Image (cartoon, rainbow, N blue to C red):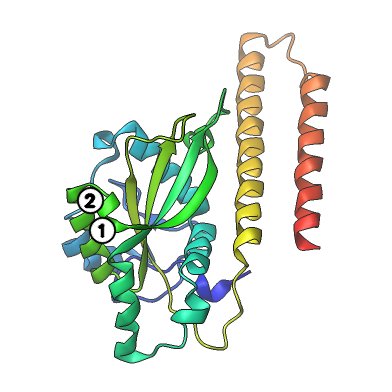
Amino acid sequence: MDAPRLLVCSCPTCNNVLPHPPKRCMACKARAYCNKTCQKADWSVHRLYCKPRSTLTDHDKTAFAYDAKHRNLLVTVAYNLYEFDKLHLHLQGKDRLQFLAIAKTSFIHIKLQRVLDPPPRRENRVAFLDPRVADVTSLAKGQMSGAFDRVERRFPAFCFGYSIVDADGSYTAISSVTHPFSWPALNSPKPLKLQKTLNLVQLFERMWVLEALEEQEGRERKRFALLNPLNACGTCWMMTKGRKMAGEEVEDKWHQFLA
């Protein structure tokens, strides 16, 4: 899968691919680093935008939770929408600033839709709807200047804006986040095409839902066992059968994707 295009450390002087799981800023959970040294080196910039999660809106928390789960694939979406292979990959040295001029005046607008009766975990409250390149003037004035500054300081980087749309297609807010990436070498593997990437995003959404339901069921079993130690029993056969069928559905789609 696309190793050269994985997200890199948020420190602008570091080009290392992030470890898994990445080490995140404990206050905002938005920036990720290789180690504490990189985090300290980036603090002069990050402190301007670091907001404790307690101060974020519900919209921001949901958008950022979704971003954290899917950001690698969404960087590939941005790569395709900007036609990076065709228009920018060949640029070298100072010529790469041509892409900086584009990245500072636009962002990838990801529209999400609410999920009815969502499973546990905040990232499962929304589902992918539509991506497109949008003009940076679509952002609020404060967001626009902040995004402009972050893209410039963390270049090369993509700016993403997440909106949760209503049934009529309208939305009231855009939560923005900037992700630095490693400029690919000319001979690096080609990324997934846009449609395959979008299919994979939807497949992973389904996988996160199954994972959340599995964890919820495990907690309920433990709770039942504590309350009824003499009558603890296994999972209801209907729940087990339903989860098995859903897992088989995901596995089938995964094999179809690889075919």
What residue is drawn where x is 23% and y is 69%?
Answer: 41
Q: Where does the image place residue 197, in percent across and percent down from the top left?
A: 61, 59
Q: Quadrant of the N terminus?
A: bottom right
Q: Residue furthest front?
A: 168
Say if 144 sits above or below 125 in the image: below
The residue carrying pointer 2 sits among few (fewer than 14), some (14 to 19) or many (20 or more) residues within 10 Å by Cα, namely: some
Snapshot quadrant of residue 119: top right
C-alpha gap between disc 1 and disc 2? 6 Å
Which residue is tagged 1?
Answer: 147
Q: Secondary structure at mark 2?
A: helix
Q: Secondary structure at mark 1?
A: helix
* Left or right, residue 158 beside residue 210: left
Q: Residue furthest bottom?
A: 93
Q: Nearer the viewer, residue 58 or 222?
A: 58
Q: Nearer the viewer, residue 134 or 232?
A: 134
Q: Give, as a three-letter code, the residue at label 2.
A: Gln
* Left or right, residue 103 beside residue 229: left
Q: Nearer the viewer, residue 35 or 120?
A: 120
The residue carrying pointer 1 sits among few (fewer than 14), some (14 to 19) or many (20 or more) residues within 10 Å by Cα, namely: many
Q: Where does the image place residue 93, in percent across and percent down from the top left?
A: 33, 90
What residue is drawn where x is 32% and y is 58%?
Answer: 135
Say if 234 sits above or below 37 in the image: above
Q: Where does the image place residue 129, in percent across and percent down from the top left?
A: 54, 44
Say if 72 sits above or below 161 in the image: below
What residue is drawn where x is 18% and y is 49%?
Answer: 141
Which residue is tagged 2?
Answer: 143
Snapshot quadrant of residue 180: bottom left
Say if 98 sits above or below 149 in the image: below
Q: Quadrant of the C terminus?
A: bottom right
Q: Give, as a three-letter code, the residue at label 1.
A: Ala
What residue is drawn where x is 30% and y is 75%?
Answer: 100
- Is residue 119 visible in this depiction of the protein? yes
